[in-house]
Image (spheres, rainbow, N blue to C red):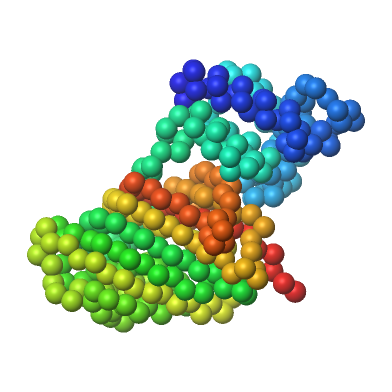
Amino acid sequence: MDKKSIDDTSRTLRELLLEPPYATRWQRHIARRQSHALHQSAICQVIAEYLWANDLQPAGDGALPRKLKDRVYRALGGQSLSLGTLRWFIEAFEMTPEHTATLLRLAGPQASGGTVIGGSLVSPGTLPPRRHRTVSLHEWHRVGPDGLPESHRTVHVIRAVERLDRYPYVFDTDAATVRVVHGGRSGKPYALDNGLYAVDIMPTTPLEPGQTASMEYETTFWYRTPPPQEFRRASTGRIENLDLRVQFHPLRLPVQVWWSEWPALDQQPSMSEPVALDSDKCAHRYLDAIESTVVGFRWQIVQRR
């Protein structure tokens, strides 16, 4: 962030933390509840509890709140404020989507822009060679009344960069069946490295370089054990016009949903922000493009006993 972005974001962050419900979170850690000044040690305690609860720091590190004091002091004083630190505040205090959007807008376009670019995701040779680029990708992930992924529908428009007679659809579970709705036919699933699997989808007609095809395919899940409560889209190349949607069953709604970005498939999220469900019980995000990154939604559904 530049100096103006830091000043504006820091000032707004201080104002929010002085008002309910955020003030209530840090005030419970001090004897004088109705304080009109920010108590930085109490704020550090709230952030530390968030980091412990999400396994982002060792749970036994009792010195963590003290270690956070310099970072919190600089953030609230407008001296320095990284996007990572800002997202700690947002998640630790469970800020509303409106307040989250305000803070990210003030932090600058790099915080919430329509294009997400990352680094290397998997080892070379893990994935089949790319002979296409994605013109648009719409994905609709549905979670059933048992809290488990139920199905996933994809509408994918691709353009061949060299002759293409098959598109490898890659996913991260063997508990799935793929059916092509239109635009081609599917082959048998096969295993890749790193716990990944793929199904080759053969277009109705092989594509020559520059030709475009639209495919729609549906993935049905049959998990034996509950998977992580998340839906992720990874891209080793560039994906344009990405539309992601996760719909929850009205009988089993999540207590919290986050939009997240991961630096790699086997790493923890590098950023997360809370999102609200719409009237259809969906979490939704549109991006102009992603490239060499992992993005998606995480959620928390309390499992029934």
Rendered location of residue 48, percent (x, y) = 70, 39
Q: Is residue 72 above or below residue 89?
A: above
Residue displayed at 41% across by 50% down: 286
Rendered location of residue 140, percent (x, y) = 43, 65
Left of 229 or right of it: where is 136?
A: left
Q: Is residue 253 visible?
A: yes
Front residue of 209 and 127 = 209
Residue displayed at 83% across by 25% down: 35
Left of 257 or right of it: where is 171?
A: left
Number of marks in picture = 0
Rendered location of residue 214, percent (x, y) = 24, 66
Taking the view exactly as shown, the residue that stands out farthest to the front is 279
Residue displayed at 65% across by 71% down: 251
Rendered location of residue 199, percent (x, y) = 32, 74
Q: Is residue 123 visible?
A: no
Left of 57 or right of it: where is 26?
A: right
The quarter of the rendered structure image containing the C terminus is: bottom right
Taking the view exactly as shown, the residue that stands out farthest to the bottom is 188
Task: Give residue 136's quadrant in the image.
Answer: bottom left
Residue displayed at 64% across by 61% down: 254
Front residue of 136 and 192 = 136
Taking the view exactly as shown, the residue that stands out farthest to the right is 31
Q: Is residue 157 above or below residue 2?
A: below
